Image (spheres, rainbow, N blue to C red):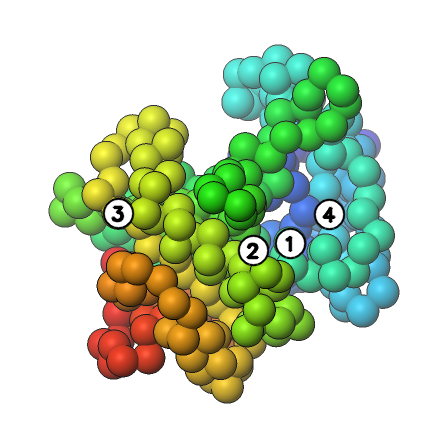
Amino acid sequence: MNPKLTSRDIAVLVSAYHYRYLSTSQIHRLHFPSLQTAWRRLRALTALGCLKSFEVPNILERLYFLDKKGADIVAIELRIDGEELAWHRHNRQPKDYYFLKHFLAINDFRILLTKACTDIQLLGFIPEYIGEKTKDGFVKKYLRDRVENYSHTPDAVFALEKDGKPAIFFLEIDRGIEVVTDPEKGLLKAIVFYLNYWVEKGWLRYNEDFKREFPTFRLLIVTTSLVRLQHIREAVTNYPFSPSSVKQFFWGTMDSWVRVESVFEPIWQSMDVNDVTAYRIG
């Protein structure tokens, strides 16, 4: 006999749709009191054809994404048709380890941010993979923008509101493998994009997405170590740009400092090494 789907099971399927790929521990953090309970229900949902699971070398956990029956349930739950759900565009099993590690790191941040938002409202979170299929069969990423000679896709864009004051943030998860001193490639190239993006007020396009007006934006960089963070700060500080004050809107921290209980604490450092203020995003 097939197990009956609970409201929590349906919530798991909706999360699998919104997050695209989730690990066992991520689903546990989102919906279950224990890993054992999560494993039991995930096995049942996989057996029912609601989820698919797979493994990737160097990632210790099983990963899950939405299967056909699960997509049908999500479409009913969200009251949208299957074509609008666009489930068929990402119902495949990726094999790129580096892609998945980065993808899961973005999901980790999104989950802890969601969990941390109690007295702060999360107005929305747009991950980098959101896009629309073109007539040529390619996917145009919604977040991709171009300013000057630089084009870039943020890892995510999200907005918060507290006491009626909204703020918008661009997220970059740095894996510690890109060069940080060359403005023509790697992380510094992305920083140069954001510097010009600030000058050209490119973030204003998101006023419509979040139904708010944002006077400025913050760039958040989550990196691997304190040494790496300092190198990034020095590279950004040394890059000649006017106005130089814009660098104070760009903040960084270490991934080991980012937790549900700390993400809204003053763990963020300005990309201007002359600015010694410890910032908070909430």
Mark 1–mark 2 Cα distance, whole angstroms, equals: 5 Å
Q: Which residue is mark 1?
A: 103
Q: Estimate the x, y position of residue 55 in percent, counting from the top left.
A: 83, 57
Camera-side mark, 4 or 2: 2
Q: For residue 212, what is the image quadrant?
A: top left
Q: Which residue is mark 4?
A: 64
Camera-side mark, 4 or 3: 3
The answer to the question of whether label 1 and label 2 lie on touching residues, with beta carbons closer than 8 A, is yes
Camera-side mark, 1 or 3: 3
> Type of residue at label 2?
Ile
- SS category of the residue bearing label 2: helix
Give the left or right position of residue 199, taking residue 94 as reference: left
Whichever of labels 2 and 3 marks the residue nearer the N terminus, that label is 2
Q: Which residue is mark 3?
A: 216
> Type of residue at label 4?
Tyr
The image quadrant where one finds the C terminus is bottom left
Q: Is residue 265 visible?
A: no
> Type of residue at label 1?
Phe
